Amino acid sequence: MELLIVGTLEGQIGAASKIAVAQGGHVSLADTIEHGLDVLRSGKTIELVMIDVKLDVYKFISSLEQERINVLVVACGVANDPTLAVKAIKAGAKEYIPLPPDPELIGAVLAAATRENHALIYGDKKTETILKMAKQVAPSEASVLLTGNSGTGKEIFSRFIHDNSKRANKKFVAVNCAAIPETLLESELFGYEKGAFTGAVARRIGKFEEASEGTLLLDEISEMDIGIQAKLLRAIQEKEIDRIGGKAPIKVNTRIIATSNRNLEEAVKNGSFRQDLYFRLNVININIPDLKDRPGDIIVLAKHFVKKFSELNELPMKDISSSAEKILLNYLWPGNVRELENTIHRAVLLSTGDTIDADSIILTDPSAVKEPLEKEEKTTESNVSAGGTLADMERRMIIDTLKHTMGNRTTAASILGISIRTLRNKLKQYQDEGIDIPTSM
């Protein structure tokens, strides 16, 4: 665990550092927000930031978001100042730790930060075969191309390859090529010098350089602009990159794993993807099948998600009933593992008995059901489809989820698997109908 402490922590830096070190962590110190940002910009591996609540937490987290630096942030301050604690949480801090620090609390936060959130859970023979192949090629230096539809778990498999490689003790850095605007992707990958362009307030190490000696995942590489593809090809071939505004090339030793949910051979034919880059990336190709084609994974994953979301929401563990399992196995899962995860998250929140039953399994796309189940197994769903009550169940699901998140619409939208705009439109409709909407605490 690499920990960065930003600020004085009310004179409690020494105590917090000792606790972190005792938990197996390594500690870096920064006295100001700008100093803390410089540490993160440098490419140093930091997994958790503890920031003094008296500093401008909002400014710090906003800077992280603007510069696309992903790190867990917790705020720390004196226990008798709840106003600052609330302000820090609203600014985006994931947790608040009162000072003086409690060893068990800091230990729990460190454990949560280092807990494996990318576990590869499976039960299907097809998945087992894929993993054997991935494990076989992992120790090599070859580039790997993972293909498959969205939500199949390509990033999880890429982490598995890294964890079983000779670079396992080095950094794994992921870049979502589809989520970063074309104008920013070059600076994200290759970094820039201070003053290289408007807004370049300090040198920023790019992902290629940050992942040197480790692994760089280029997620959804098919969405990368063809102009940047040429620079990427050079970086892979020559093992060197040029920071924007830099005066000399920088040597890197970075292994590449790329993913795509599109047919790259077709992209090469239509001119949207470079053939020479495709050949460079496609040394080893591993295709990840849709969830419906590896049914042995469904219930195993569902139980894993029940455990995950029960712990996350501090709810008692529940079994999945046989009727609920049949519904899960009778669905085609067009959104793959990601859709299953959202469905189980909803079910954990909506179930009221000792088990997760069929009435808590709300499917996103009823047309993706393989075949009708027998009536006795579909009693709840029959009631839903009668008399226009599907809309009633959707409303109940949204309102119940919003209650559970204490009115936090962003979190509710994430759990429901819908956009925040869709949620707002639904809530406005309900308000117009005179329905009470849970508000933020």
Image (cartoon, rainbow, N blue to C red):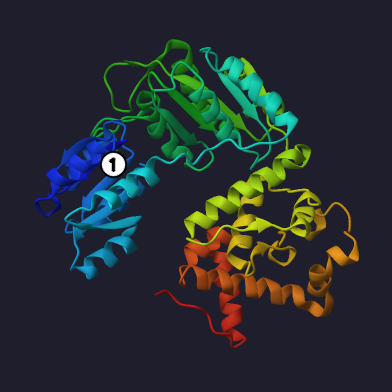
Q: Position of residue 312 (x, y in %)?
A: 48, 56
- Visible in this render: residue 117? yes
Above-or-below relation of 11 to 123? below
Residue 93 in sight in this render = no
Q: Determine whether 229 is above or below 262 in the image.
A: above
Where residue 70 appears, as percent x and y from the top left, is 38, 42
Q: Is residue 69 left or right of residue 394?
A: left
In this rendering, position of residue 222 left or right of residue 185: right
Spot occupied by residue 253 in the image (x, y as percentages of width and height) = 40, 15
Please report the residue visible at 54 percent of the width from the left and 55 percent of the height from the top. Answer: 309
Q: Quadrant of the C terminus?
A: bottom left
Depth check, front residue: 336 or 252: 336
- In front here: 336 or 349? 349
Left or right: 123 as drawn, with respect to 111 = right
- In the rendered image, which quarter is residue 155 located in? top right
At label 1, the amino acid type is Thr
Residue closer to the observer: 70 or 197: 70
Which residue is the site of mark 1? 198
At which x and y percent is residue 399?
58, 74
Q: Most extreme residue toward the bottom, as rendered? A: 434
Q: How packed is label 1: few (under 14 Cα within 10 Å), some, or many (20 or more)?
A: few
State the quadrant of the N terminus.
top left
Query: Residue 369's image quarter?
Result: bottom right
